[in-house]
Structure formats: C-alpha cells, structure tokens
Image (cartoon, helix red, strand yellow):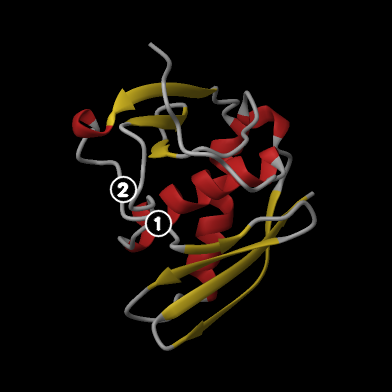
C-alpha cells in the first residue's frame, strides 16, 4: 500500500529551512510563544513572525541568537519519520496543516531539540548550517518579526 502525502510546492534552501525549525523551538523555550505561523525562508536571508505580549529586549534577542548557534554546533542529526495523523504526539503543533492534509504525516526532528510536521527540504546534520545571525528585528502590535541569515 502506497503512502499518500500532500504535495509540496516550495523549494526551500535546506540549511535555512532547518534553521527555521531550530529558531522556532528556541523562541518557544525562551518566550513561551507558538511556532512562527508566517515565515519567508530564502537562501540569502529569511524572516519569521512570532506573537508576543511584550517587546523582547536586545539582551533576549542575543540569547536567542546564541542558543540557536549552540544547537547548530551540537552537530545534531536531522531525521524523518512518518505517522498517522491520529497518532501524532500532543507536543506537535498541527495548526499550520492544510484542511486536506493526508492521513500520513512526515515528522522532522532536529536531534532531541525539535520535532514538527513538515514536508520541506532539510539537511542531514546541523553541522551543515553554518552560523546563524539575526540581521534585525522589530516589534509592533504584539508581532515580533525576526530577520536572519546564515554566514
């Protein structure tokens, strides 16, 4: 029996896309927010939006950058597994999935640091990423936009 998956219509830059996963988990841990619901991931620079109740301090944003780089330096494996949508662990946010999502979900893990449902392209190990750098960020109407690149 063949597994039916939803089609993927984007072509991400795998190191940057994998970094988005790490950034999302870092934001969850530091600010207690949800994963980014609005992101634009490109080779040269990317951005993610997060809903926060208060503006982060420059010190907090430096902590985010430092933590993402700490995770990258751990040379964590990126692994893929498949599961039935009815058997997804509670810790996995399914709110970004389309209404016509397939019964089989692809889960992408960054070591033991992050796991989420994702159909995008990824690297094999965080050692392939490079250095994460926050270019800029702004906070307006409870939305934090983080712009970043890899160097």
Quarter where residue 122 is shown: top right
Work out whether mark 1 precedes mark 2 in sequence or the reverse, and give the earlier one.
1
Q: Residues within 10 Å of mark 2 (few under 14, many from 20)?
A: some
Q: Residues within 10 Å of mark 1 (few under 14, many from 20)?
A: many
> Residue 15 appears at what percent x and percent y?
69, 39
User: Mark 1 against mark 2, which lies toward the viewer?
Assistant: 2
User: Looking at the image, which residue is at 26% across and 34% down?
Assistant: 85
Q: Which residue is mark 1?
A: 35
Q: Secondary structure at mark 1?
A: loop
> Residue 12 appears at what percent x and percent y?
68, 46
User: Looking at the image, which residue is at 39% across and 39% down?
Assistant: 116
User: Looking at the image, which residue is at 44% across and 68% down?
Assistant: 50
Q: Is residue 31 above or below residue 83?
A: below
Report the front residue among 40 and 48. Answer: 40
Quarter where residue 19 is shown: top right
Report the front residue among 36 and 121. Answer: 121
Any part of residue 76 in sight: yes
Q: Secondary structure at mark 2?
A: loop
Q: Which residue is mark 2?
A: 94
Any part of residue 67 in sight: no
* Separation of residues labelled 1 and 2 (CA atoms): 10 Å
> Residue 112 appears at what percent x and percent y?
40, 28
């Amino acid at each position: 029996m063949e597994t039916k998956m939803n089609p993927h219509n984007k072509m991400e830059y795998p190191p940057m896309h994998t970094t988005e996963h790490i950034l999302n988990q870092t934001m969850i841990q530091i600010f207690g927010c949800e994963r980014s619901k609005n992101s634009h991931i490109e080779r040269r620079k990317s951005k993610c939006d997060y809903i926060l109740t208060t503006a982060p301090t420059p010190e907090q944003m430096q902590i985010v950058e430092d933590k993402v780089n700490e995770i990258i330096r751990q040379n964590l494996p990126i692994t893929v597994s498949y599961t039935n949508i009815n058997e997804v662990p509670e810790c996995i946010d399914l709110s970004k999935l389309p209404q016509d999502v397939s019964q089989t979900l692809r889960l992408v893990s960054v070591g033991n640091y992050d796991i989420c449902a994702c159909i995008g392209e990824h690297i094999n190990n965080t050692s392939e990423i490079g250095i994460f750098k926050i270019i800029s960020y702004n906070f307006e109407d409870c939305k934090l936009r983080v712009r970043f690149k890899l160097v």
